[in-house]
Each structure stands twice: as structure tokens, then as C-alpha cells.
Image: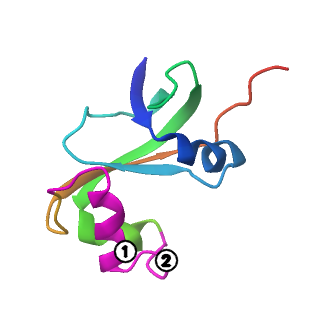
Amino acid sequence: MQQLALVARLFPSLFSGEKTATIRWREAHIEPGPMTYVCEDDPAKRAVVQVTRCTYMLLAEVATFLDKADLWPDPVMLEGMREHYPEIALTDVVQVIEHLAPEMPAA
């Protein structure tokens, strides 16, 4: 199954259903279908999501594409992405991976 690493601080928003997309640069190509997020800090912590759409575009276009332009003006987007990809620029092509909220594990 395809998988991506995810920082621990984003798992709560993933499980709440608030996080339904991720932006990746120079990482493995992802396709629609099941995908596992693996926690960078605790690889035993995982979440399976259903990827619904994958789109390549300039980083500068992502906020508008995801309807988050008010939350992510260019400087905010760039600062957030550089936390993970220090060399990224707004003119770089990224993959936007959209997905449904993960299914909660059975209790």
C-alpha cells in the first residue's frame, strides 16, 4: 500500500477530519486509492485514508485550489512548506493529494 510520513502534530486534525489534503514536493508519486499515513515520531501510529484526487500544480496555486487562500497567503504557505522542504519555492511543482478522513480503528 502507498504511504507517506506525517508529523505527529498533524494526526489530531487528520483524525478529526479537518485535514483532508497534503502537499508533497519531490516525494513518491501518489495515486487515488488507499494510502497509509505513518507518524514520523512513532511509526506504530498509522492512519489509512482513501485518496480521492491527486493534482500537480505550482505551490503558488495550492491555497486557491484548496479554497484556503485566506488562511494561506503566499508568505504563510511558503513558511509552512519550508518547515519540511527548506529549498522549496512558490514556483515549484508540488503534488496535492486529497483524501477522505481516516476510518477510526475498532475499539
Tell me whether the residue at label 1 lies in contact with that at label 2, contact meaning CB atoms closer than 8 angstroms: yes
**Residue 84 shown in magenta:** yes
The residue lying at 70 percent from left, 31 percent from top is 103
In depth, the one of 80 and 14 nearer the eye is: 80
Q: Residue 71 carries which label?
A: 2
Q: Label 1: few (<14), some or many (≥20) within 10 Å? A: few
Left or right position of 68 against 18:
left
Q: Which mark is residue 76?
A: 1
Left or right position of 37 against 48:
left
Q: Quadrant of the N terminus?
A: top left
- Image: 29 above or below 22: above
Residue 49 at what x, y percent from top left?
56, 33
How is the model colour-coded? rainbow
Q: Residue furthest front?
A: 41
- Image: 63 above or below 14: below
Residue 88 at what x, y percent from top left?
17, 58
The residue lying at 20 percent from left, 55 percent from top is 86
* First to last magenta residue range: 67-87
